[in-house]
Amino acid sequence: MSETGVDLAHLSVIFDLDGTLIDSVPDIHATANRVMAELGFAPLARTEVQAFVGKGLPNLVARLLERHGQNPAGVLHDPTVARFEAEYLTAHSLTTVYPGVLGALSQLATRGAALGVCTNKPLAPALAVMDHLGLTPFFSTVLGGDSLALRKPHPDHLHGTARGLRRSQSVFVGDSEVDAETAHAAGVPFLLYTEGYRKSPLDQIVHSAAFDDWANLPSLVTIWG
């Protein structure tokens, strides 16, 4: 059997969402400036907002408030998180699926892998954007940043996703330092997508393998799964 035809029925392949499957920073940036403008704050550059992405919405809001000279845990925090969540449900017009994602997901599913998403994005906005982009049918389990008491990089977030997929082995696919830390803590192979939102040089992020083209992912999954 060729490598591309290897049966993956024993395996779950779990993915991060933002910066891995989808390029959502354009919408996150626009939403951040829109919501913060309502509070009277000046707009920030995309690179500034992108640097705050990856640790969940409460952290994003805390960092934005801090950047604007506010107490990151003060009275503005919780109402601003709620405002972001409402905006995120429909803020999809600038978000795109990375090239090659759909083909890779189709190939993995055809070969029997169970596919899941483990994201720090709140669950409702995550499902909304996945529905909008046609990703939802590929995934039988999706855990958001508010699905459990703990979120990435705590390993329970990834373990919880894996339990939902009910396979004997797992690999994790992500783009960031947080994803690498999560995989390491959970004891699963980490496949690093290099074109996402990482902040560190490649050699400073612990990973089992790295790829910049989604066409290469199925073969990496075969090796590490």
Image (cartoon, rainbow, N blue to C red):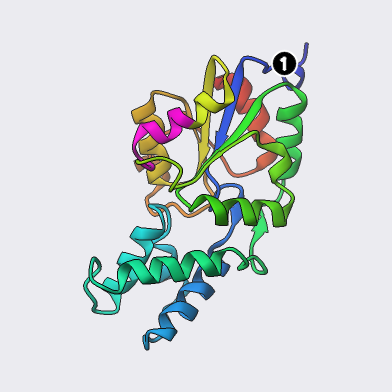
Indicate whether residue 168 is drawn in magenta.
Answer: no
Residue 202 appears in the picture as rendered: yes
Residue labelled with disc 1 = 6
Residue 206 appears in the picture as rendered: no
Residue appearing at x 46%, y 71% in the figure? 83
User: Element under label 1?
Assistant: loop
* Residue 205 x, y percent position in the rendering: 38, 40
Q: 182 or 201: which is nearer to us?
A: 182
The segment highlighted magenta reads 150-160
* Residue 170 x, y percent position in the rendering: 53, 23
For residue 172, side relative to residue 11 (left or right): left
Residue 11 in which image quadrant: top right
Residue 75 in which image quadrant: bottom left
Residue appearing at x 43%, y 66% in the figure? 82
For residue 220, side relative to residue 178 (left or right): right
- Name which residue type carries label 1: Val
The quadrant of the picture occupied by the N terminus is top right
* Residue 198 x, y percent position in the rendering: 43, 51
Question: Eyeballing the image, is 46 above or below 60?
Answer: below
Residue appearing at x 47%, y 68% in the figure? 84
Residue appearing at x 52%, y 43% in the figure? 16
Indicate whether residue 156 is drawn in magenta.
Answer: yes
Q: 131 or 113: which is nearer to us?
A: 131
Q: 215 or 108: which is nearer to us?
A: 108
